[in-house]
Image (cartoon, rainbow, N blue to C red):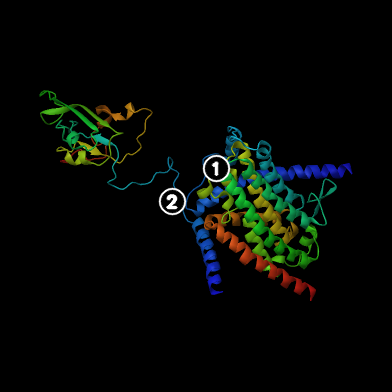
Amino acid sequence: MWEQILAVIVKGVIIILILMGAAAYMTFLERVIMARMQLRLGPNRVGPLGLLQPIADGIKLLTKESFMPARVEIFTYWLAPAISLMTAFMAFVLIPFGDTITLWGHSVSLRIADVNGGFVWLLAFSSLAVYGIVLAGWSSNSRYSLLGGLRATAQMISYEIPMGLSLLTIALATGTLSLPEIVNAQQQHWLLWTNPLSFIIYLVTAFAETNRAPFDLPEAEHELTAGYQTEYGGLKFAIFFMAEYINILAVSAIAVTLFLGGWHGPWNIPILWFVVKVAFFVFLFIWVRATMARFRYDQLMSFGWKVLLPLALLNLLVTAYLVLV
Amino acid sequence: MKETIVKVSSVLTGLWIVLKHAFRKPTTIRYPEERRRLPERSRGRHYLTKWSDGLERCVGCELCAIVCPSQAIYVKPAENDPKAPNSRGERYASDFQINMLRCIYCGYCEEACPTGAIILSSEYELSAFSREDLIFTKDKLTEKKPGDSGRDPAREI
């Protein structure tokens, strides 16, 4: 009992530390890759190849003045970044990073919790993520923030449904809601090949869920300054930023787990294949951001409700038919 | 349907083009370490040149100060001592100042100069900690040895 609790705590701390570091270096990676795609060099001054840039940024954000606009809802204002970060972390409680391995005589399973209904938990927490953004927008007492928060609500609700529907096809195809079992069901072939449409719909909605380009309307800098995070600075801003990047990691990890066969790959190296696949998705996110322009609000809405939703429904029906027959 | 295919394929083409650009050489350079080659006739800071025998070319005619559209040049002429002349003419510039903050690098002074004394080199890194430091005086403007500015000291103009 105590050993199990200790193991969970140790695993949790390790994962949080890795995710924080990964989020910091994703900002660096994003700047460098986007720069190269735009024929620039990107940050290359701090440390060799600019590798210490995220640390310098972190120190800068830590030492910034902590300001608060007039008449904010203080409690919510402080709570919102925490909600954002926490919901981003929550997905990683369930993601299986690998099979069971043996470390110093103990057998360690490379996941924090093995919940048999893990699937539902994932969907629940990806829906909760919007609260951080909406509350930030509401409590900041600023027009930009409020508009950003409202946009986030509309966008998240519109894209949550196709996302859930597209993920349901996975549950139908594998007949289980437990993530490790779904991964194990992909040993022969990835679910990407049997459910390609689900994958595409999930990918599009993942971009919308993480508020990334081309769906970054809640923080559209041309119209809304910085959207819901306009009135945040210093460490609170850093937490929002980190939440965004950990969210990207989370949706990438979910995509890898559900569609790309999780940790499975040649030679059975633990974790490595998982990391490689997630890294590919991270690159995809950056790549798409460097390519695409932002959607207009009405385009975003009509795309979500008139294209993705019918497509996802049809996809679900066809999958259900194929599973039944 | 056809429209949808066109839209999707245009998105994919866009992604491909962006990916291709990632493997091109960046246009940006690491500035203080690397420097871009400037065009031959680009205009930067001024020099007051000398003849190859070390005499100053400037004869203190003040044409450059007159032609200067931003009134950045101040010339104070003085009579040459016949025994130890500073220039080949009757007069020379005893003081010569250019306010680099006013100068617009148009090159009119170089065109107006009858002896080819004032020239614009291609050095563009002009910065200082005070405004006074950017008023270049004669000793700063005059080349130390003939030919230091990069112009042939034996040229006619």
Q: Nearer the viewer, residue A188 or A307?
A: A307
| Residue B148 shows in the view | no
Q: Nearer the viewer, residue A314 or A210?
A: A314
The local crowd at label 2, few if under 14, some if 14 to 19, many if 20 or more residues have their Cα within 10 Å, is few
| Residue B93 shows in the view | yes
A239 vs B136: above or below: below
A9 vs A172: above or below: above
Name the residue at 49% across, 48% down: A41
Side of B51 relative to B129 (left or right): left
Name the residue at 69% across, 68% down: A313
- Mark number for residue A301? none
Name the residue at 44% across, 48% down: B28
Name the residue tied to disc 1.
Answer: A50
- Residue A166 spot, x, y in % from top left: 70, 64
Find numbered disc 1 in the image and state the secondary structure of the residue it sits on.
helix
In the rendered structure, the residue with mark 1 lies on which chain? A
Quarter containing the N terminus of chain A: top right
Find numbered disc 2 in the image and state the secondary structure of the residue it sits on.
loop
Q: Quadrant of residue A142?
A: top right
- Residue A40 spot, x, y in % from top left: 47, 50
Name the residue tied to disc 2.
Answer: B27
Instruction: Name the amino acid type tagged 1.
Output: Gly
Q: Residue furthest right?
A: A1
Q: Residue furthest bottom?
A: A325
Distance CA(mark 2)–CA(mark 1): 18 Å
Q: Nearer the viewer, residue A128 or A143?
A: A143
B153 vs A212: above or below: above
